[in-house]
Amino acid sequence: MNKKGLKIVTIGGGSSYTPELVEGLIKRYDEMPVSDYWLVDIEDGKEKLEIVGALAKRMVEKAGVPMNIHLTLDRREALKDADFVTTQLRVGLLPARVKDERIPLSHGFLGQETNGAGGLFKALRTVPVILDIAKDISELCPNAWLINFTNPAGIVTEALLRYGVHKKVIGVCNVPIGLQYAFADILGVNSDRITVDFAGLNHMVYAEKVYLDGNDVTAEILKELTSPDSKTQTMANIKGFDWDIATMRAFGVIPCPYHRYYYKTRDMLNSELEEFKKGKTRAEVVMEVEKKLFEMYKDVNLQEKPEELAKRGGAHYSDVACNVINGIYNDKNTIIAVNTRNNGTLKQFEDESAVEVSCYIGKNGPVPVETVTDLPIFAQGLVGQIKTFERLAAEAAYTGDYNIALLAMVTNPLISDDIRGRKLLNEMLLAHKKYLPQFKNVIEKIEKVERAEF
């Protein structure tokens, strides 16, 4: 790794998130001297790439750091001799997310980007592309770490670990750091004094222990969170239905915001159905936010990340991604919750399974902290079922096997319906066929059956 200047590549560089990542690299330039930062996108994302790239150049110029910003549609050109590669792509762009949400809701199921049927289909579209990127990395920059932020991060990491040719892989998410910041706010301290033992899966992670300056303050945090007056909220993009105080106390560990989809399924579904009836899903809200953001990004006078980006739902992404890069580059052994190979950390899962746990991040990558323990028995069933879903989803995405995809659909606890689950699977395969080449033959058979029925 070149200590004189890092080369970092972001695939999906035209994303609205990129200015936050640029800001993070600028803030850490003294520790992480990035000489060349490449933003890569596809032809359909060219306009956004140019808008974001121009803003990135203005941000770097204002900061006065010698970081060269490169824009390209040629992924292989960018990857040559890279030190770190980050991925934040969306196959099918936001219109595909609209389908991921609207189609399940039309069948009476939750539609969400990383959970249920929506999460399954985002994985089916995404995994083959990420595996192809990993193949290029293994050829063009084999020593680089691939740091993935693309959702569903758990399934993507699972697929990379099981089927990818490049094994230096870390999945990152902003949920754990959002919780860490919330705990710091509760205690009225700086977040760097807080460490947390996180254990579970992506968007299915629990905070087992919370420490302030190394001292266990979990009981104090739980007391605040289970106070009738608690107003703690950690995710801008998830409905803040109040947790039942007695149930939270019984947990003894702290769930993440996404657990509401499983412990408050009726409330979440009813809320989404109400929005659906009004013609407005979360995906369509995000499209409006993105449209406004890109209008702001076009302003030649804008030289910094706008505050409005926080409404996009990915706040603190740069902190996680940049802290991971910094931890590896400077061998810091920083404690960060990431998606990584289990290697016996959580005994209910195979070694090669992807888990989300607190790790020391140093020059050799993530090493789970020794205080992370198996999840309490009440959580193991739900987390185990989600891991089964992730395994099946990753395999279906890799193989294009219809039966595996069907098992993934009906195994997910937000579906759990054989007939309706199969009909939903078929409809979504047809809706997304442009981005599912591995299912080409399957989709043709479904189309023939549908034509025969009319």
Image (cartoon, rainbow, N blue to C red):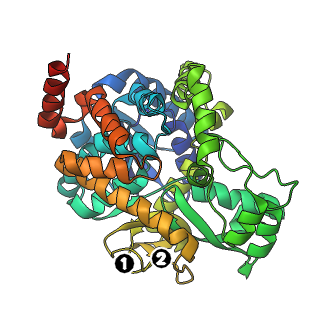
Q: Pointer 1: residues within 10 angstroms few (<14), some, or many (20+)?
A: some
Is residue 96 or residue 39 the one in the foreground? 96
The relative height of residue 205 versus residue 104 in the rendered view (above or below) is below
> Percent from the top left, x then y, of residue 436?
23, 35
In the rendered structure, are the residues bearing label 2 and label 1 in contact, judged by CB atoms less than 8 Å apart? yes
Distance CA(mark 2)–CA(mark 1)? 9 Å
Looking at the figure, which quarter contains the N terminus? bottom left
Label 2 vs label 1, nearer the camera: 1
The relative height of residue 223 versus residue 153 in the rendered view (above or below) is below
The relative height of residue 273 versus residue 353 in the rendered view (above or below) is above
Is residue 266 or residue 121 the one in the foreground? 266
Mark 2: secondary structure: strand
Q: Residue at x 54, y 80 (%)?
A: 373
Q: Which residue is drawn at 42% across and 50% down?
A: 416
Q: Where does label 2 land, which residue?
A: 368
Q: Residue at x 23, y 27 (%)?
A: 434
